[in-house]
Image (cartoon, rainbow, N blue to C red):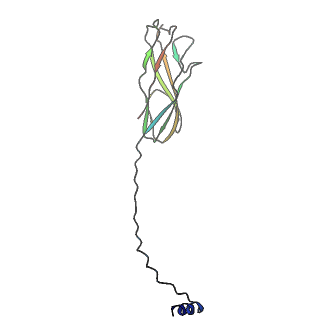
Amino acid sequence: MAKRTALAALSSGLLVLPALPSPALAATGAVTFNGTVTSSCAITVTNGSGTMTPDPTLKTLSSHNTGGSAGALTLTTTGNVTVSLDPVSAVSVPAADSTATTWVPSYSMTGAQTVPDTSVATAIAGSGTNTLAVHLTGTKTGTNTFKNGAYAATVTVRCE
């Protein structure tokens, strides 16, 4: 008899399907994400060896002089940081040079922010990548001059 009912239903254009289970109630849940980016700064030294050359009067020894070259680094920051230079360290001079030298480090910056050559701290407000050229100048006063021999010093760039 069931076959006849099914056949009768098919012949009348009706399709009888067995009862399906009712769908489960849908449920949802939300996940909220939070994050904080703090001020940060990364320094990559790209040329850790600057060259100082004397001026014709032997009164300055500098990476700014003809034939001199700057050290270079890349600074990447989220902003709200300050770039500065520590006092010159690890100074070595030839034994023949016994007179005082004033050492002044400086830097210039291009990229996300442009800063002309300076020796003072610079606030970096925005985020981005900057290239720094780091220079060093030694100066003699009075009748004192640079003597024959090797000179060296270290300039530390700070970003905080």
Residue 54 vertical placement versus 45 (above, below): above
Taking the image as shown, residue 40 lies to the left or right of residue 15, namely: left
Where in the figure is residue 42, as x and y percent of width and height? 46, 36
Q: In which quadrant will I find the C terminus?
A: top left
Q: Is residue 84 left or right of residue 46?
A: left
- Say above or below: 156 vs 146: below
User: What residue is shown at x 43% (from left), y 35% (from top)?
Assistant: 82
Query: For this rendering, which residue is in front, 40 or 61?
Result: 40
Q: Outermost residue toward the top?
A: 96
Q: Is residue 11 visible?
A: yes
For image coordinates 47% across by 23% down, the residue present is: 105
Quadrant of residue 122 within the rendered picture: top left
Residue 132 % position (x, y): 52, 31
Residue nearest the observer in this picture, 127 or 94: 94
Picture coordinates of residue 99, whole percent (x, y)? 44, 8
Q: Is residue 116 visible?
A: no
Callout count = 0
Residue 158, given in percent of the width and then of the height, sits at 43, 30
